[in-house]
Amino acid sequence: MEFNSFSFTVTGSPISTNKLYYNRGRRARILSDTGKRFKFFVGHVANSAKRGAGIRDIIETPVTVYIQFYFKTRAGDADNCVKAILDALTGVIWKDDKQVADNGERGVTDTGTRFRLVAEKWKDAKNPRTKVTIHYQTN
C-alpha cells in the first residue's frame, strides 16, 4: 500500500457552518450566498492543489485529513469550521465525507486501511487562514 499527500491553504478567517446555511421552516436548510462563495472558493483552491499533485479524479479511498485553523482570536469555533471545510471538499476531493473519520477519531476500513481527521486551532491575528493536508492511498 502506498500513500501520498497534498496540502493547500484557504486565506481569510475560518468560517463556521452556521454562516453557510440558513433555515427555512423547520426542516429546510438552505445554502446562503456566503456559503456558495465559500464552497466555490475552497473547492477551487483544493482542486488546484489536487491537480498540482497529479490527481485528476475524485479520491474514492479513505483519507486522513489534517486541518489547522488560524483564527484572529482564540474564540473561533473549530468544530463547526471542520464541518464547513469537509462539506466544501465533498464532491471535489473525495466522493463522500464518510471517507473521513470524525474529529480526533480513527477508523479502519474492511481492508485494514486506517484513516482519521485531526483538527487544530491556533491564533494568528495578522494572517487568519485554514491549512489542509490530505493523505490518501494510491494502491
Image (cartoon, helix red, strand yellow):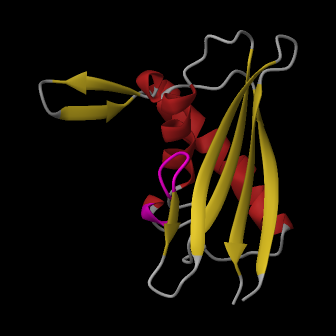
- Percent x, y of residue 40: 59, 43
Rendered view: 36 above or below 125:
below
Quarter of the view holding residue 106? bottom right
Q: Residue at x 69, y 35 (%)?
A: 120
Give the magenta range: 98-105
- Percent x, y of residue 69: 71, 30
Rendered view: 8 above or below 18:
below
| Nearest to the observer: residue 117 or residue 71 | 117
- Percent x, y of residue 39: 56, 41
Q: Is residue 66 left or right of residue 18?
A: right
Residue 125: tell me if it is visible: yes
Residue that extends furthest to the left in the rendered view of this protein: 26
Residue 100: tell me if it is visible: no
Q: Residue at x 64, y 61 (%)?
A: 64
The C terminus sits in image quarter? bottom right
| Nearest to the observer: residue 110 or residue 7 | 110
Q: Residue at x 26, y 33 (%)?
A: 29
